[in-house]
Amino acid sequence: MKTSDKFKYEWLVGLLAWAAQLWMLKSLPPGIYWIVILLLFSAMVLMPLSRRLSDSESQQEWRPKVESGSALFMTCTFLTNSATEAIPWLLVRSAAAYEAIRNCSSKKLRDPAELTLLSARIFPAIGAAWFVAHRAQWTPWGFDPLIVLLTAAHFHHAGFTLPLMAGLNAKASPSCWTRFSCVAILLGVPLVAVGITGTHFGVLKFVEPFGVVVLVLGALGVAVSQIGRGLERQRSILTRICFLLSGASLFASMVLALGFGLRYVIPNFALTMPQMWAIHGTLNAFGFGLCGILAWRGAVKRAESL
């Protein structure tokens, strides 16, 4: 029995635990509450739910339990006000990133689809490091604690679900369009991070809007691909609905991201930062991420049954 099948309901435990966090963490400051909730949703629900889509079949059987356990444990850091409980999550994500890099052959390096799927296992380790920094009350390079937390959340969502589904689309339907989406996302995610850092230090301010445009173009390609799959009649109605919701949510969230990224150029089209993490973050986590992963699970299950 494959690990992904053996632990196929593991995500449900994470979902129930995450739902409990909605109440347990309600005492958090309003400014960070929803950011934390969305970050935990990726760790506790989206990652276990996507395991059969992104992980190799040869992975050790103990890993799903360890990953889920560390994801549940990381929530305790908000109850103890300590970074200790977040360290196991950092170790788990670092181990996954190391394994991805170690198994990265020259063939995979030349394939944008495979490289993008690998990045979906590497980028969350960066997010985990920033999460530990936030819980330890560190402010790397003088960044505001809110920016530290937002960076952690960014790499748990844009650094995970976006490259994951870009890679799945490119593998399922290889074309110039899907390969471009992969390359743009691989470049866009780190470019945005570098651009924000440059803006913080008052240098290379053009990198942030440039990185946002590159990332948005790649994401829009994924949105179009997801919507296209939702229009394919051979799929089940639920799978089609999930694909359509995923693509539409990503399209809407990327339009918002473009406006925010170009706020220094066209300020009238930008949402405020609280509006961005509330609307943009929610669309990415539930609309694009959850619906997209459910859609791909349905597609994979149908393909395996044929």
Image: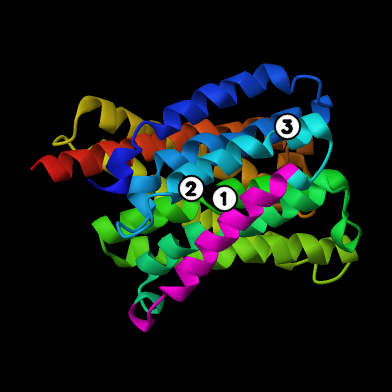
What residue would you read off at disc 2?
A: 161
Check whether the beta carbons of the residues at disc 2 and disc 1 lie within 8 A of each other: yes
**One can see residue 147 in this view:** no
The quarter of the rendered structure image containing the C terminus is: top left
Q: Residue at x 32, y 67 (%)?
A: 176
Specify whether 293 is left or right of 27.
Answer: left
What kind of residue is marked 3? Gln
Q: Residue at x 91, y 59 (%)?
A: 142
The magenta stretch spans residue 112: no
Residue 105 x, y percent position in the rendering: 38, 79
Q: Nearer the viewer, mark 3 or mark 1?
A: 1
For residue 275, the mark is: 3
Stretch in magenta: 85-107
The secondary structure type at the circle numbered 2 is helix
Measured in 3D between alpha carbons, the distance from the residue under mark 3 to the one under mark 1, in whole angstroms, is 17 Å
What kind of residue is marked 1? Ala
**One can see residue 53 in this view:** yes
Q: Nearer the viewer, mark 3 or mark 2?
A: 2
For residue 158, the mark is: 1
The secondary structure type at the circle numbered 1 is loop
Q: Nearer the viewer, residue 8 or 111?
A: 8
Circle 2: is it few (<14), some (14-19), or many (20+) Cα within 10 Å?
many
Relative to 132, residue 294 above or below: above
Relative to 220, residue 201 above or below: below
Check whether the beta carbons of the residues at disc 3 and disc 1 lie within 8 A of each other: no
In the displayed image of the protein, which residue is found farthest to the right?
142
Measured in 3D between alpha carbons, the distance from the residue under mark 3 to the one under mark 2, in whole angstroms, is 21 Å
